[in-house]
Amino acid sequence: MIDVQSLAMRYGPVVALDGVSFQANPGEILGLLGPNGAGKTTAMRILTTYLYPSSGTAKVDGIDILENPLEVRKRIGYLPETLPLYADMQVEEYLNFVGKARELSSKSLQERLGWVREACQLKSVWKHLLCELSKGYGQRVGLAQALIHDPKVLILDEPTSGLDPIQIIGIRSLIKSLAKEKTIIFSTHILQEVEVLADRIVIINEGKLVAQGTKRELAEKVLAQGQSAKELSLEDIFIQLLAPRKTVNA
Ligand SMILES: Nc1ncnc2c1ncn2[C@@H]1O[C@H](COP(=O)(O)OP(=O)(O)O)[C@@H](O)[C@H]1O
Ligand SMILES: [Mg+2]
């Protein structure tokens, strides 16, 4: 569903991405894991066609992001790192506005507004101003705007950042429930988040791909002789993958 091919991005002298390739299969939740500054947001901005890469490309649902960015945007719902919310709009007005910008017919817009209101549990704040919302509800509205046009692909940049533990549980279960019908890529620097949410993991560090695979596949890359994959926590795996390469099996 998503095929990232040797993406590179330079901001002047800063190399934010250095030839990164990875794939996400249909219906999969892919966790993009890496420390701050690894290049996660840059990769997501390129995939959602808000940034033009220095080189490389990607396909979303078979469509090239450079050749046909508008068609790619139609297929993607995007929760950016910081959402441009209009403080003086009510939740309903804002989602209505996003739906119109997405060119939904008035009939399907009404259907979708009803759907996101339920799915993102926005009933209690439906008529509230955006500036009145807690961070947790702000993220729910962010997810609702990403879902309004029922996209095949969801790209979520640190969807639980800044939330309290109860809100994190809520957002994670919402993401899980969406995965049945959608391909989801989310980014995080929190190991536990990929552990609970992701079917497959892509680890990037300093703009480079470190490894990709299921937790088990990643474990197999760092197994010592006689050790079983089950004995390794994701933390062990992550530390070893980011450690000097001599400890990692090719
Ligand atoms: N607009 C920009 N101008 C210059 N450097 C940038 C810009 N955006 C990001 N960077 C740099 O690119 C690198 C990757 O950043 P980013 O993609 O935001 O990483 P992440 O989301 O993993 O924290 C960092 O070194 C960051 O400072
Ligand atoms: Mg980021």
Image (cartoon, rainbow, N blue to C red):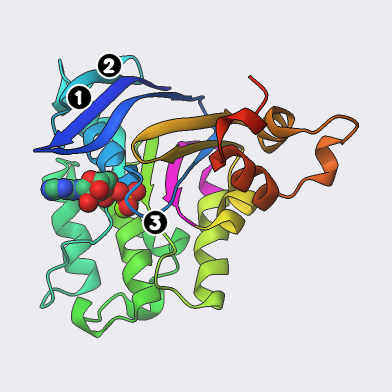
- Residue 147 seen in the current view: no
Q: CA distance from mark 3 to mark 2?
A: 25 Å
Instruction: Say which residue label 1 marks.
Output: 71
**Residue 168 falls left or right of residue 131:** right
Residue depicted at x 41% and y 66%: 161
**Residue 41 falls left or right of residue 165:** left
**Residue 2 falls left or right of residue 81:** right
Instruction: Say which residue label 2 marks.
Output: 63
Report the mark closest to the observer, 3 or 2.
3
Residue extending furthest toward the right: 226
Q: CA distance from mark 1 to mark 3?
A: 25 Å
Local crowd size for mark 1, using a 10 Å CA cut-off: few (<14), some (14–19), many (≥20):
some
Tell me which numbered mark, 1 or 3, is placed earlier along the sequence. 1
Tell whether label 2 touches label 3 (CB within 8 Å): no
Report helix, strand or loop for mark 2: strand
Local crowd size for mark 2, using a 10 Å CA cut-off: few (<14), some (14–19), many (≥20):
some
Task: Say what amino acid the circle numbered 3 marks.
Answer: Glu
Instruction: Say which residue label 3 marks.
Output: 158
Tell me which numbered mark, 3 or 2, is placed earlier along the sequence. 2
Residue depicted at x 31% and y 71%: 138
Q: Which span of residues is magenta-colored?
A: 177-189
Q: Please check the rendered image and state whether residue 184 is part of the magenta-colored stretch, yes or no.
A: yes
